[in-house]
């Protein structure tokens, strides 16, 4: 048992946490750049280079793997599968589908339109819309590399629960009439895709890596840059005063700080890492991440062109309340993740 535990710890350190990369970047900073790791500049340079390379490596590998799996489930086939399930089963399936679609909130909306125009239940489509930008397999492994398995799995589970509950509530409210008319009239080609060869799937996966990389690279750089600034330049006392557990409004503040920021989960993880290092509660950090990924202003603006104000307000209220509950609950039971 000890041997297995040792092997797992070694694999986790080398493959997910990339200790080998940490050591290489440390040599680069100290020997090539001539900076001390204990200095603010040296620490910031190391944080930035290490996190950027680590995220890009993991992102490329994970997106390739996920895209290869996705090649077996193109939109037409997915719609047929989802169309067979209704009620809570359909919402669960819609939320789970979101975990294998590595899209930001804005990229998820066109798929949401396609699912809705195909006649899928509104609850199913909203469960997908909530889970897709918030949780996916790539984010699970990235979170594991930064925060460990307990927090990563807990984040994905509560994200899925929020997606299922949110979709269920919207479905029970019967808000189909609050979808813009043009959505129902959108053309929806129901074409069975051609069988793909292994080479086709590999080519498709490579293209997905390129496309998603183009979409997220700038947010990763910004996120890591902000994380480096928080980690090495902003005093811990200042962070704790605003977002520390002694502030009863920390989760609320973190959620609303996240909303104006447009990024996907890959850009928020470095910021979350820096906040945790500064003593911010894990629930507050998760609330920030969920606010950024699910309720960003650009995505809300896009969604407002698809749904009418009453449904938009209901969606925002459900997700916001859910994030706040999750944030405060995680802070209250943070001892379970130590």
Image (tube, rainbow, N blue to C red):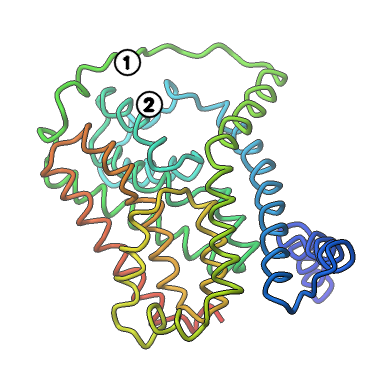
Image side of residue 128 versus residue 149, left or right: left
Q: Are marks 2 and 1 in contact (CB under 8 Å)?
A: yes
Residue 45: image x %, image y %? 71, 63
**Element type at marker 2?**
helix
Q: Residues within 10 Å of mark 2 (few under 14, many from 20)?
A: some
Front residue of 169/285: it is 285
Q: Nearer the viewer, mark 2 or mark 1?
A: 1
Name the outermost residue toward the right: 31
Q: Earlier in the sequence, mark 2 or mark 1?
A: 2
Q: Residue at horizontal 56%, vertical 70%? A: 274
Front residue of 219/96: it is 219
Q: Residue at horizontal 38%, vertical 65%? A: 287
Residue 44: image x %, image y %? 67, 67
Q: Which residue is mark 1?
A: 188
Image side of residue 253 versus residue 205, left or right: left
Q: Which residue is mark 2?
A: 79
Picture layout, residue 101 above or below residue 161: above
Residue 86: image x %, image y %? 27, 38
Structural distance between the alpha carbons of marks 2 and 1: 10 Å
| The quarter of the displayed image where residue 229 is located | bottom right
């Amino acid at each position: 048992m000890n041997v297995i535990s040792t092997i797992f710890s070694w694999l986790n350190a080398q493959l997910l946490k990339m200790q080998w990369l940490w050591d290489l970047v440390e040599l680069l900073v100290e020997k090539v750049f001539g900076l001390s790791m204990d200095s603010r500049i040296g620490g910031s340079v190391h944080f930035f280079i290490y996190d950027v390379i680590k995220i890009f490596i993991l992102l490329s590998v994970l997106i390739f793997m996920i895209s290869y799996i996705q090649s077996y489930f193109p939109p037409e086939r997915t719609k047929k599968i989802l169309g067979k399930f209704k009620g809570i089963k359909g919402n669960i399936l819609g939320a789970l589908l979101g975990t294998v679609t590595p899209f930001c909130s804005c990229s998820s909306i066109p798929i949401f339109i396609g699912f809705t125009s195909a006649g899928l239940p509104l609850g199913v489509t909203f469960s997908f819309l909530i889970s897709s930008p918030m949780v996916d397999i790539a984010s699970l492994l990235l979170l594991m590399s930064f925060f460990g398995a307990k927090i990563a799995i807990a984040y994905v589970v509560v994200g899925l629960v929020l997606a299922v509950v949110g979709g269920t509530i919207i479905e029970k409210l019967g808000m189909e009439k609050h979808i813009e008319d043009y959505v129902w009239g959108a053309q929806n080609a129901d074409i069975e895709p051609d069988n793909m060869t292994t080479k086709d799937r590999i080519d498709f996966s490579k293209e997905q890596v390129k496309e998603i990389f183009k979409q997220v690279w700038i947010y990763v750089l910004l996120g890591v840059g902000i994380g480096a600034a928080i980690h090495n330049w902003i005093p811990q006392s200042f962070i704790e005063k605003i977002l520390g557990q002694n502030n009863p409004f920390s989760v609320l503040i973190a959620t609303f700080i996240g909303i104006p920021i447009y990024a996907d989960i890959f850009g928020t993880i470095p910021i979350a890492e820096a906040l945790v290092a500064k003593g911010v509660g894990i629930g507050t950090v998760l609330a920030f991440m969920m606010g950024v990924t699910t309720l960003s202003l650009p995505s809300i603006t896009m969604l407002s062109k698809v749904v009418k104000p009453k449904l938009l307000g209901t969606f925002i209220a459900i997700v916001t309340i859910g994030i706040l509950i999750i944030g405060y609950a995680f802070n209250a039971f943070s001892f379970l993740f130590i």
